Image (cartoon, rainbow, N blue to C red):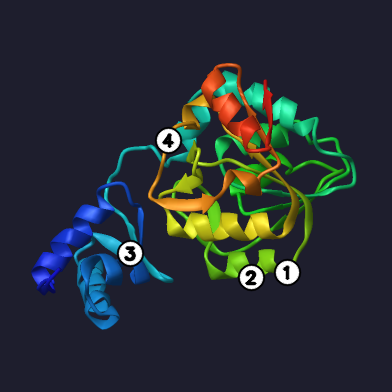
Amino acid sequence: MGRMGSVERQIKLQELLTGVDEFVNLSDLCRRLNASRSSLRRDLIELEQRGILRRVHGGAISISQRDESMDYRKLASSRHEEKARIGKATAALIENGQTVIMGGGSTTVEVARHLLDRPLQIITNSMPLAQVFWESRQVEVTLTGGYMYPRLGIQLGPICERMLNGVTADVLVMGVRGITQSGLSDGNSLVVGAIRTMIEVSSKVIIVADHSKFGQVSMLHVADLRDLDVIVSDTGLSPEFRNMVENSGVQCILA
């Protein structure tokens, strides 16, 4: 397509940030808007000055009022009964003495509640999850560091990923935005970068996801189903999706 003018680009940027994306990646924007990095940087600076976005490493994040689909408090109250059952079943898969990476999200917090009295080393980028272990004398907790993502309470970005690249873990426990035959997906490239690194440094990958996450697809591909070892979901999962998981060689546990 032809090159856009500055005003047109800024309108498109605002549409992207008030649509499915909370974070826009500068490299992706160059491709999607057919614009140079220098032009887009100027647009982002102007939109930041107007209070529409905030520039962060590698792109920009919306600061306008959004729905709460990415709000931790909203997520924590959604499908709580299913998540509690998933948390208990997942904790049973973890052995004492293991090093466990735990990603952000309300379902992983439910897993953490069942690990309080276990001798474990936990590495996490989630502040809500770390708080679960606040008074635990058994669990050793290490935070990744990194940019603190608003409302989700998770640490992301280059600092987070560098820390993760320096460790190895027995198990990874993480949630995800969407699961289909194509694999896992998310709409935020900062989140995707952290998740991919977590998968790379972990010997075993456990996904925790209630049945509503199945059939959902977001913009960015995270991992193939074959990259996973176990998916723990709830009994509301349809036979179609259970067969999809098991036919990919992934163990499916319904709690």
Which label was assigned to residue 166?
1
Which residue is under mark 4? 216
Instruction: Report how far apart the C-alphas of labels 4 and 2 lie in the structure.
Output: 30 Å
Q: Amino acid at mark 4?
A: Gln
At 9% from the left and 73% from the top, the residue drawn is 5
Q: Nearer the viewer, residue 187 or 113?
A: 187
Query: Horizontally, is 46 left or right of 226 in the view?
Result: left
User: Which element type, helix, strand or loop, lies under badge 1?
Assistant: loop
| Secondary structure category for the residue under label 3 | strand
Mark 1 neighbour class, 10 Å CA radius: few under 14, some 14 to 19, many 20 or more: few
Q: Is residue 237 visible?
A: no
The residue type indicated by label 2 comes to Arg
Mark 4–mark 1 Cα distance, whole angstroms, equals: 32 Å
Closer to viewer: mark 2 or mark 3: 2
Q: Pointer 2: what residue?
A: 162
| Quadrant in which residue 218 is drawn | top left
Disc ID at residue 98: none
Q: Estimate the x, y position of residue 243 in percent, counting from the top left.
A: 59, 26
Q: Nearer the viewer, mark 4 or mark 1?
A: 4
